[in-house]
Amino acid sequence: MLKHFEELSIPEIAELTGLDTGTVKSHLFRAAHKIRECLRDLRKKA
């Protein structure tokens, strides 16, 4: 949400959340991967 809708940078997100930038990147990568998987599953059902 912070990255895509609020358009915050990774360092800004890290500062707001108290996480390391690497951790923020990791969370973003995993979330994007999960979304891609869900979309792939939806396409298969259609």
Image: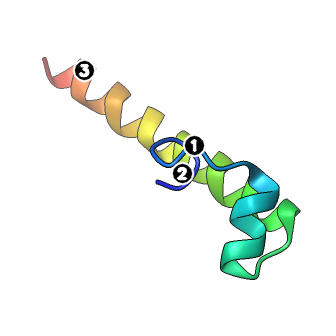
Labelled pair 3, 1 in contact (Cβ < 8 Å): no
Q: What is the distance, in whole Å, between disc 3 and disc 1 at their CAs? A: 31 Å
Label 2 neighbourhood size at 10 Å, few (<14), some (14-19), many (20+)?
few
In this view, the mark in front (3 or 1): 1
Residue 5: x %, y % from top left: 45, 44
Q: Which one is in front, 9 or 39?
A: 9
Question: Judging from the image, what secondary structure is the residue with disc 3 in?
Answer: helix
Residue 31: x %, y % from top left: 54, 51
Residue at left offset 77%, top offset 73%: 15
In this view, the mark in front (3 or 2): 2
Q: What is the distance, in whole Å, between disc 2 and disc 1 at their CAs? A: 16 Å
Left or right, 8 with reference to 40: right
Q: Mark 3 points at which residue?
A: 44
Q: What is the distance, in whole Å, between disc 3 and disc 2 at their CAs? A: 20 Å
In the rendered image, the residue lying farthest to the left is 46
Q: Which amino acid does label 1 sit on?
A: Glu
Question: Judging from the image, what secondary structure is the residue with disc 1 in?
Answer: loop
Q: Mark 1 points at which residue?
A: 7
Residue at left offset 64%, top offset 51%: 28
Q: Name the residue under label 2.
A: 31
